[in-house]
Amino acid sequence: MAPPASPPADAGGNLEHSGQGHIVLYADRHLRVTWSPPDTSVTLSGEVDVSNSAELASALTRVPDSDHAIVVDAADLRFIDLSGLRVLLDPSLGHGNSATGYGRAVRLRNMPPHLERLLRLLGGGHDRL
């Protein structure tokens, strides 16, 4: 079986490889989104808000297809607002698509306390993550 294809290049046309074999899907001064081919997980580092939530959605939709959910490691996520949480609930929403999404679930691991608290305060949604 052939290995999954690499995600498309960033807006500059280049795939940036960070240390530890991760591929940078998106980076700005507040957020860095990397994909790890060995375990097919995505790592979020920094802050997600309305200024970069659409870019996060775009990065998540570029994760190579598999039969499994997109696993997102949120250990290094310092802040997330409602727009970012919406992207994690349904990445297609960041592109203005219908709420039915494109069929890939997101599973969070290593959730920081502030994200767990936000999900609790909203009274749901965490069962989908």
Image (spheres, grey):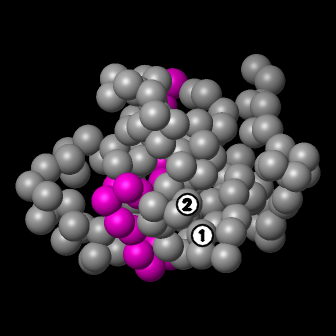
Query: Under tag 2, what secondary structure?
Result: loop
| Left or right position of 53 against 127 | right
Where, quadrant-wise, is the N terminus in this rendering?
Answer: top right
Between 38 and 12, the one lying in front of the other is: 12
| Left or right position of 106 against 126 | right
* Structural distance between the alpha carbons of marks 1 and 2: 8 Å
Query: Can the viewer see residue 101?
Result: yes
Q: Amino acid at mark 1?
A: Leu
Q: For residue 78, what is the image quadrant? A: bottom left
Residue 64: % across, % down: 66, 33
Question: Which mark is in front, 1 or 2?
Answer: 2
Residues rendered magenta in the picture: 67-85
Residue underneath mark 1:
31
Q: Which mark is residue 57?
A: none
Position above or below: 53 against 78: above
Q: Residues within 10 Å of mark 1 (few under 14, many from 20)?
A: many
Residue 55: % across, % down: 60, 51
- x 19%, y 71%: residue: 117
Count all numbered tags in the image, as a single digit.
2
- x 45%, y 61%: residue: 50
Residue 58: % across, % down: 60, 43
- x 79%, y 31%: residue: 5
Residues marked 1 and 2 touching at CB (< 8 Å)? yes
Query: Under tag 1, what secondary structure?
Result: strand
Q: Which mark is residue 52?
A: 2
The answer to whether residue 18 is magenta is no
Query: Can the viewer see residue 41?
Result: no
Q: Amino acid at mark 2?
A: Asn
